[in-house]
Image: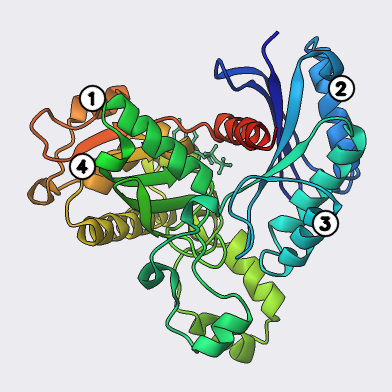
Amino acid sequence: MDSTVLVINCGSSSLKFQLIEPDSATSRATGMVERIGEESSLVADHGTALRRAFEMLAEDGINLQACGLVAVGHRVVHGGKEFHRPTVLDDSVVGRLKELSALAPLHNPPAVLGIEVARKLLPDVPHVAVFDTAFFHDLPAAAATYAIDHGLAEEWHIRRYGFHGTSHRYVSERAAAFLGRPPDGLNQIVLHLGNGSSASAIAAGRPVDTSMGLTPLEGLVMGTRSGDVDPSIVGYLWRAAKMGVGEIESMLNHRSGILGLAGERDFRRLHELIESGDGSAQLAYDVFIHRLRKYIGAYLAVLGHTDVVSFTAGIGENDPAVRRDALAGMAELGIKVDEDRNAKGARRISQDDSPITVLVVPTNEGLAIARDCVSVLGRRA
Ligand code: ADP
């Protein structure tokens, strides 16, 4: 029987799970438990959610004790300064992860909860944390450093960490494999556009810049997050609108972005609203595209020479209009998209004579996490 890895991704109110055979890259089962802890929900907490996930696997005919389970992989958003390699979890690592929650209060606490519950429910298999920040750990200092008071930044571990790293690494490796080139022979821009969105510039296999920063709030316009804003907005709202800091952070993370501008965050719905003549939806789309184009231009300049631009995640993989508008009019910068290929959702959507190749590359963070688990356990054995 092929060995399997259970990959768990805990958000504040949802738990996604996937059972994967890393060797054959096969997903045996996948599912999601939603509305954790919400009023009127049957799922009171993350423990109940995980038990529900096990029931869903059993309903699919999967017995976790008898499916060759070799590890449980946990996606952890923030690894802080300390964690960048996949890390086998024990009590001391879990304790240190809890300390990191101050850096990522919206993201890490649910993951830690999920880890604690899963270790209790599956005590006989190793549990491994895989960090969203890992790929960007060695960003060049010029890209990782905020130009703020140096002593304060040091004391409070303030730097640009970058997120979605598992996806940026996986997609850049798949893009290189598709082109039959080694990753260290290519300069790439990866555009991960989903509910959360981020861009990265990768030179010869090493990330040299990425759009997310201390937290996943910085950078592109997202489903509910503002992306880049002038930080003075926080002080101004605090003084003028008498809003609390927590309230302002919550607004920037949960009620901004496409949702904040259009009242809707899903791009399929956004296009319908635009079709029906909704001006707010059009503005939200235009702001999203404008920011995306700014990052693409910036990363073309950061890299100097670019071989490939890849689109991935829910929007990047499925929305031809976004891909078209993000790259329109960039022939002089070396990017020529083929309208037909783009509309059909081909893997290579650039014209044959485009100096920069443009690809659509489905991401697979679950598989990348499962493989990281197997490789760290293999190294330990
Ligand atoms: P997450 O960050 O939750 O992993 P995904 O990568 O799954 O997000 O992306 C989800 C988003 O992708 C949805 O909110 C929706 O905006 C967008 N999306 C999914 N399918 C399509 C589609 N066919 N056309 C346009 N947008 C889509």
**Residue 132 picture location, percent across and down:** 57, 50
Residue 31 horizontal side relative to residue 224, left or right: right
Label of residue 92 in the image = 3
Disc 2, SS = helix
Q: How far is mark 4 from mark 3, CA to CA?
A: 43 Å
Does label 4 or label 3 sit earlier along the sequence?
A: 3
Q: How far is mark 2 from mark 3, CA to CA?
A: 30 Å
Does label 2 or label 3 sit earlier along the sequence?
A: 2
Does label 3 or label 1 sit earlier along the sequence?
A: 3
Q: Which residue is mark 2?
A: 55
**Residue 128 picture location, percent across and down:** 72, 41
In the picture as drawn, the residue positioned furthest to the front comes out as: 381
Residue 23 visible to an observer of this rendering: yes
Classed neighbour count for the residue bearing mark 3: other residues with Cα under 10 Å, few (<14), some (14–19), many (≥20): few
Q: Which residue is mark 1?
A: 341
| Observer-nearest of 262 and 26 | 26
Does label 4 or label 2 sit earlier along the sequence?
A: 2
Q: Which residue is mark 4?
A: 307
Does label 2 or label 1 sit earlier along the sequence?
A: 2
| Quadrant containing the C terminus in the rendered view | top right
Q: Quadrant of residue 122?
A: top right
Q: Amino acid at mark 4?
A: Asp
Q: How far is mark 4 from mark 1, CA to CA?
A: 19 Å
Residue 41 visible to an observer of this rendering: no
Q: Amino acid at mark 2?
A: Glu
Does 171 sit above or below residue 209?
A: above
| Quadrant containing the N terminus in the rendered view | top right
Q: Amino acid at mark 1?
A: Arg
Does label 4 or label 1 sit earlier along the sequence?
A: 4
**Residue 249 picture location, percent across and down:** 63, 71
Disc 3, SS = helix
